Amino acid sequence: MVQRGPMLGLLAQVAVLGVLADEVGLGTSGWAVGLAYAAVTAGALSLALPAHGLDRLGPADRVTLTRAVLVGGVAALVASAHPVPTGLLVALAAVALVLDRVDGEVARRTGSATGFGAAFDMEVDAFLVLVLSVYVAPTAGAWVLLIGLARYGLWVAGRFAPWLREPVPTRQWAKVVAAVQGVVLTAVAADVLPAPVEVAALVLALVLLTESFAHQVRWLRRHRVPAPVRVGVPT
């Protein structure tokens, strides 16, 4: 049962990639990124479920898995060597963003909220933001990649400062800020706003994201537990 959910997600991702290849073409790079993403997602879920004491995906997790498959489609389109069909890319990203509200509501209504589900949801959000920032960077400027790389930069920092990996209290504002990143990047990707408005929206999104991460780091620094001091034993 542990493997069933991840395997279904993997098969669904391959099916979506096949549809995209038939409709718009993906090329070798698009297929490579899409399949790599599918394999990593399935493998990570297979390891994370038992690590959290779970033997299957919950109702909300299945919604998140659907979002993950859509995000995989967005990633494949962005990586494709062919011209990216903006309308299709924006549509996939928009549905993934809408479902972000759905999985939280399902978790509350079914009483199936878990730490695993929250982490899974966060990683899907972060990867969508990264992919969208890569897509808009050529026109908006390379600085937009700071939005997409922020989450992963903190993760890397946590490898060197373990206290940065500690859990933090849920902050509703942080959820709002996370949602703003996806909405702003999707709107910019759609190219329906005047250029000055797009730049202003991206700058605002980055400022909000910086404040949110700074608040998290400050909280973790104030509440970190000092590392135990090892006392040598005289010989």
Image (cartoon, rainbow, N blue to C red):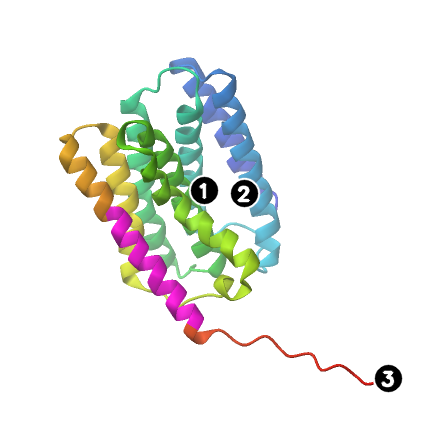
Secondary structure type for disc 3: loop
Specify few, some or many for label 2: CA neighbours under 10 Å numbering under 14, 14-19, or 20 or more. many
| Mark 2 residue type | Gly
Q: What is the C-alpha distance between the residues marked 2 and 3?
A: 56 Å
Q: Amino acid at mark 1?
A: Leu
Residue under pointer 1: 65
Q: Please give the label number shown on residue 124.
A: none
Q: Is residue 1 visible?
A: no
Give 10 or 218, whichever is nearer the viewer: 218
For marks 2 and 3, give the one nearer the viewer.
3
Q: Mark 1 touching mark 2, by CB under 8 A?
A: yes
CB atoms of marks 3 and 1 within 8 Å: no
**Is residue 137 rendered to the left or right of residue 199?**
right
Q: Which residues are magenta?
A: 205-221
Is residue 49 visible in the rendered structure shown here? yes
Does the magenta-highlighted stretch encompass residue 211? yes
- Does residue 129 appear left or right of residue 152 in this picture? left
Q: Quadrant of the C terminus?
A: bottom right
Give how far apart the Cα atoms at labels 3 and 1 are. 57 Å
Secondary structure, mark 2, is helix
Does label 1 or label 2 sit earlier along the sequence?
Answer: 2
Q: Residue at the location (27% across, 23% down)?
A: 87
In the foreground, 110 or 130 = 130
Coordinates of residue 10 in the picture (x, y in percent): 54, 34
Residue at image position (23%, 44%) is: 203
Height in image: 49 above or below 39? below
Residue 104 lies within the magenta run: no
Work out which residue is located at the far front of the displayed protein and give it.
235
- The rendered magenta stretch, by its main secondary structure, is classed as helix
Residue annotated with mark 2: 5
Q: Amino acid at mark 3?
A: Thr
Q: Residue tagged by mark 3?
A: 235
